[in-house]
């Protein structure tokens, strides 16, 4: 099985020749990226020895190695503990690319996303920028999807989404 550092370095495969393996420079860049992300201890380990959450983070490092303009992520927080979720989202927000991500955690979307689309059964209920939109529009869309009353509760400078009464 491939080591984590090799898995991350394979993110550069679009720039490599067909059937090529990562060269020493690509492996050094992958090690540096893993270190930057606080994942240096994973570099020598085999991909089949790490947890699902660690795989998700290694996947993010691999995508970063491509310097892509757009990332498509489907439920990327699955399998991550609270700290890793926060680290993942903070890192994602700091990246210089566009991210299209599906989530089932609207409170996380509200906190971290610049733009939110709420879709229910192939119907667009809400399309808004979080920094300029009326939060009630978001709440109404969520109430329609989940069939529960929704409201924000302010705690210091942070808003928390509350479902139910």
Image (tube, rainbow, N blue to C red):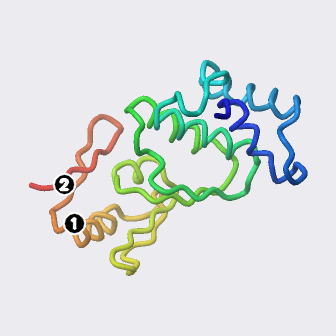
Q: Which mark is residue 163?
A: 2
Tell me which residue sits at (73%, 57%) in the image: 69
Task: Look at the numbered disc 1 and give the secondary structure of its residue.
Answer: helix
Q: Is residue 127 left or right of residue 10?
A: left
The quadrant where residue 124 appears: bottom left
Q: Give yes or no for contact between labels 2 and 1 (Cβ–Cβ under 8 Å).
A: yes
Q: Quarter of the image for the N terminus: give it.
A: top right
Is residue 77 shown above or below 58? below
Q: Is residue 28 above or below residue 115?
A: above
List the single residue furthest toward the front.
Answer: 1
Q: Residues within 10 Å of mark 1 (few under 14, many from 20)?
A: few
Whole-percent x, y for residue 162 in the image: 21, 50
User: Which is more N-terminal, label 1 or label 2?
Assistant: 1
Residue 135 lies, in percent from the top left, at 34, 61
Find the residue positioned furthest to the top.
41
**Quadrant where the C terminus lies?**
bottom left
Question: Does dot 2 land on a helix, a strand or a loop?
Answer: strand
Question: How many residues crowd mark 2 within 10 Å: few (<14), some (14–19), many (20+)?
Answer: some
Between marks 2 and 1 in the image, the one whose residue lies nearer the viewer: 1
Question: What numbered label is drawn on residue 28?
Answer: none
In the rendered view, does 117 fall on the left or right side of 1? left
Measuring from the top left, give residue 79's x and y in whole percent: 40, 40
Is residue 132 left or right of 33 when viewed as pictured? left
The residue to which callout 1 is attached is: 146
Name of the residue lying farthest toward the bottom = 123
């Amino acid at each position: 099985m491939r080591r984590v550092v090799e898995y991350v370095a394979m993110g550069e495969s679009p720039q490599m020749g067909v059937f090529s393996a990562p060269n020493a420079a690509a492996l050094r860049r992958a090690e540096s990226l893993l270190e930057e992300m606080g994942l240096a201890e994973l570099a020598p380990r085999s991909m089949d020895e790490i947890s699902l959450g660690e795989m998700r983070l290694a996947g993010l490092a691999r995508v970063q190695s491509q310097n892509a303009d757009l990332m498509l992520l489907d439920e990327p927080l699955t399998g991550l503990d609270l700290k890793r979720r926060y680290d993942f989202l903070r890192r994602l927000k700091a990246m210089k690319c566009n991210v299209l991500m599906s989530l089932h955690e609207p409170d996380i979307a509200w906190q971290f996303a610049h733009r939110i689309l709420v879709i229910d059964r192939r119907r667009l209920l809400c399309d808004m920028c979080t920094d300029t939109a009326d939060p009630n529009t978001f709440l109404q869309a969520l109430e329609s999807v989940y069939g529960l009353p929704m409201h924000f509760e302010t705690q210091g400078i942070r808003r928390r989404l509350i479902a139910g009464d």
